[in-house]
Image (cartoon, grey):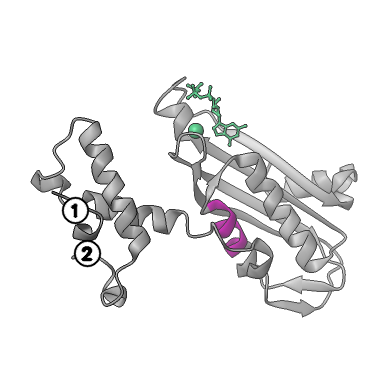
Amino acid sequence: MINEQSLTSSNTDPGQASQPNQERVNVAYHVRKILELLGENPDREGLLDTPDRVAKMFEEMLSGLNVDPVSVLNTTFEETSDGPVIVSDITFYSLCEHHMVPFFGKAHVGYLPGKRIVGLSKLARLVETVSQRLQVQERMTSQIVNAVTTALEPEGVIALVEAEHTCMCARGVKKPGSRTTTIAASGRYKDDVALRQEFLRMIGK
Ligand SMILES: Nc1nc2c(ncn2[C@@H]2O[C@H](COP(=O)(O)OP(=O)(O)OP(=O)(O)O)[C@@H](O)[C@H]2O)c(=O)[nH]1
Ligand SMILES: [Zn+2]
């Protein structure tokens, strides 16, 4: 008879082998139950390690859940710039909160510095952080803008996210190739049409 404890980990990360992760064990226990409910045999060879694998996968794909997006923008410099700073084509993978299947694509982030700039990689880390949680694309886009606005107090921030939702492609309405684009902005990017157009041009739109 399986129980949560009996799924303790032959397969936990080596670095964590001495400290079984109870949350992972609990999730794996319930994944095994789901497999049973779906009519599968979780004891067949191919599925033996699947509950633990799925638990680890969720741990990895939801690792941004309890991270404050602003805390990611921790390397800033007192510096300004005559024009906008734009980091484009930041690839991301997230999980749709309605179906818990991936949506993925590219995020483009721009800001017009005030008195401080941020380490460029931190903008990509920010996108990772807000994507590694159960999401809707609109909220993810706003969270990017809100974090940069709070951390840097720049003159303006804009983010454009384009994504393919597997819940629309592989199931349901089944429209592979359909893409969703969302935009959020703050400060001067909210209503300065020329600034917005420059951003779109610079990210190749
Ligand atoms: N606005 C928004 N909707 C999303 C996002 N991801 C998924 N959805 C939509 O969430 C909706 C959930 O609709 P429901 O009617 O509750 O679920 P459903 O019966 O599975 O819907 P279908 O996908 O149409 O089969 C669907 O229309 C999805 O396309 C997102 O990031 N933003
Ligand atoms: Zn979905």
Residue 38, horizontal then vertical, whole percent: 24, 31
The foreground one among 186 and 18 is 18
Q: Quadrant of residue 112?
A: bottom right
Q: Residue at x 24, y 32 (%)?
A: 37
Ligand 2 within 8 angstroms of badge 1 C-beta:
no
Classify mark 2: helix, strand or loop.
loop
Can you name the residue that lies furthest to the bottom here? 78
Residue 184, horizontal then vertical, whole percent: 75, 45
Which residue is label 2 attached to? 11
| Contact, mark 1 vs mark 2 (Cβ under 8 Å) | yes
Q: Residue at x 53, y 28 (%)?
A: 178
Relative placement, left or right, of 169 versus 83 is: left
At label 1, the amino acid type is Asp
Examine the rendering and report whether any part of residue 90 can be seen.
Answer: yes
Residue 96, horizontal then vertical, whole percent: 51, 39
Crowd around label 1: few <14 · some 14–19 · many ≥20 (10 Å): some
Which residue is label 1 attached to? 49
Q: Which residues are magenta?
A: 124-131
Crowd around label 2: few <14 · some 14–19 · many ≥20 (10 Å): some
The foreground one among 104 and 58 is 58
Which dot marks residue 94?
none
Relative placement, left or right, of 9 versus 77 is: left
